[in-house]
Image: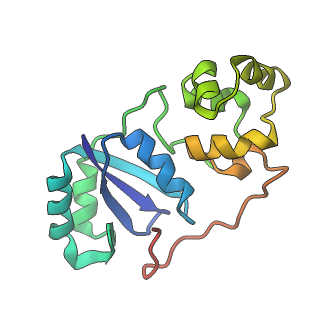
Amino acid sequence: MPVYFVQAGEAGPVKIGFAADVLRRLPELQVNSPFRLRALGQIKGDRLIERGLHIRFAGVRVSGEWFSPSPELLALIATAQPFPSRNGAVPFSRPSGRQWTVDEIIEAAGGVGKLATLIGVSHSSVCDWKRVERIPSRRAIAISKRLGIPLHEIRPDFWPEPELREPPSSEVAA
């Protein structure tokens, strides 16, 4: 089970967390964050290792499990492994700012059947979306919550892109 590192923006605070299923945890963090999160990496560990890192970096703690990106913390993160993938794509590695295609969403979910199961629709519904190359707006929220894809990147015609900003060092993306 991994201890993971996620950063708010390009230079914002870094979350040191632990999750039994890091691929499930990362989209939850993104949905609940006002900042674009970057998955930095993971190391083998458990809650004890996570706690030890929290103690080790207490001097740069911003709040809770969020820490300023000190040179020592960034050096540790540089040794971390990339995140695993269930479908060949590293979480949050896709460039943001453009609309996801239906095929990209299906691939991110792990296939047509997995997307259908994940959001509670039929296999044929997902195949219909693929045929018309559009996700119904009423399904975009479930997809966003389950896969961590921002709504404006699924249906920008319904949800315009919010103004993203880098967090000041005094703010915390909790």
- Quadrant location of the C terminus in the rendered image: bottom left
Give the vertical position of 38 relative to 149 (above or below). Answer: below
Identify which residue is drawn at 50% across, 47% down.
Answer: 27
Give the vertical position of 56 relative to 136 (above or below). Answer: below
Closer to the camera in the image, 134 or 48: 48
46 lies left or right of 128: left
Give the vertical position of 70 relative to 140 (above or below). Answer: below
Identify which residue is drawn at 33% across, 54% down.
Answer: 5
| Residue 97 in view here | no
| Residue 164 in view here | yes
28 lies left or right of 164: left
Closer to the camera in the image, 43 or 138: 138
Identify which residue is drawn at 26% across, 43% down.
Answer: 2
Q: Identify the image quadrant of residue 102.
A: top right
41 lies left or right of 172: left
30 lies left or right of 47: right
Q: Identify the image quadrant of residue 121.
A: top right
